[in-house]
Image: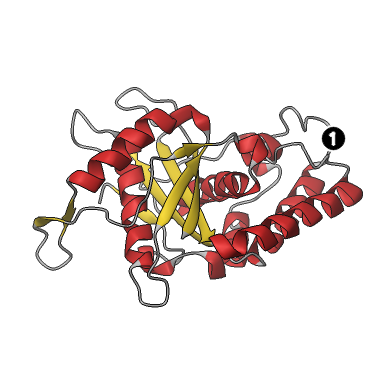
Amino acid sequence: MFLSYFDESGDDGYPVYSSELFVLTSVYLHYTKWKESHTAFHSFRQEFKERWGLPVKVEFHTNEFITDKDPYHGRYTPAERRSMLFEYCHFVLTLNVKIISVVIDKKRIQRPKYDVLKKALTYNIQRIENDLKLPEYDGRFLIIADEGRIKKMRETARAIQRINYITSQINGAPYRKEIERLIEDPLPKSSSESYFIQVADMVSFLVSLFTKKNLSNPMLPWGNRVKTVLSPGGEIELLDILKPRFNLRASPNPYGIVYYPK
């Protein structure tokens, strides 16, 4: 069995929203790798504390960290925050995990009603399912997510196990393909208590930066606080570090990023 951890960047509102993009990322690993990965992560955070003074129990929330908001405000220079972010990504590369990110670009939506979270979660689950059907895995999976959106995620996960339509890559026609490998309802866990949810948060934020400069048309601006830490191209450097952990089968995109609407 695989454990999949989900987190997001941006809000899932539509047609009223505060962010043009919604990014939902899953980080999943086989249950036999969980203990060693968690232990390695804890050791990394202890070393991180020794070098940078960031307490082990303080959540690494990437948006707030890069933009110098509480609880990190005033503790690190922009150069230090950049170094810490690169160090964090190099550590994630050592973990035996796979990562999928789904981007919903609200500027491309042409329907008056569009359920952003439902679409993003469905597309992500479909790709985990496809991956775990491969002979080398042949597994089932469980979803663990931050508590804020768990009710809606539960409703979506139940629905696509009963009826699920996907679009044929050959002729564009929809056909039924229910989700079969997901077990149980999505389970809640605070992001502050899960290293893997924090990784999903970080990747979601980096994918959002990448999408704004490389996929979105027209390009979307980065916030000024972000640009004090990363110049355009810095997000590509970080994604290149993480690339071996991305499920590149998820999409033809260089980082396997699933980008909708098409």
Q: Is residue 89 above or below residue 94?
A: above
Residue 214 % position (x, y): 45, 55
Residue, disc 1 = 75
Q: Nearer the viewer, residue 45 or 209?
A: 45
Relative to 222, 161 lies left or right: left
Residue 166 % position (x, y): 18, 54
Q: Nearer the viewer, residue 138 or 113?
A: 138
Q: Nearer the viewer, residue 171 or 192?
A: 192
Residue that sits furthest to the right in the current view:
50
Q: Nearer the viewer, residue 194 or 53?
A: 194
Number of marks in the rendered image:
1
In what element is the residue under mark 1? loop
Residue 168 % position (x, y): 15, 62
Q: Say how the picture is coloured.
A: secondary structure
Residue appearing at x 78%, y 30% in the figure = 73
Relative to 222, 149 lies left or right: left
Q: Amino acid at mark 1?
A: Arg
Please tell me how crowded label 1 is: few (under 14), some (14-19), or many (20+) other residues with Cα within 10 Å: some
Relative to 203, 17 lies left or right: left
Residue appearing at x 58%, y 45% in the figure = 197
Residue appearing at x 47%, y 38% in the figure = 187
Q: Is residue 73 above or below residue 208?
A: above
Q: Is residue 94 above or below residue 101?
A: below
Residue appearing at x 41%, y 57% in the figure = 257
**Residue 246 is at least partly visible in this image:** yes
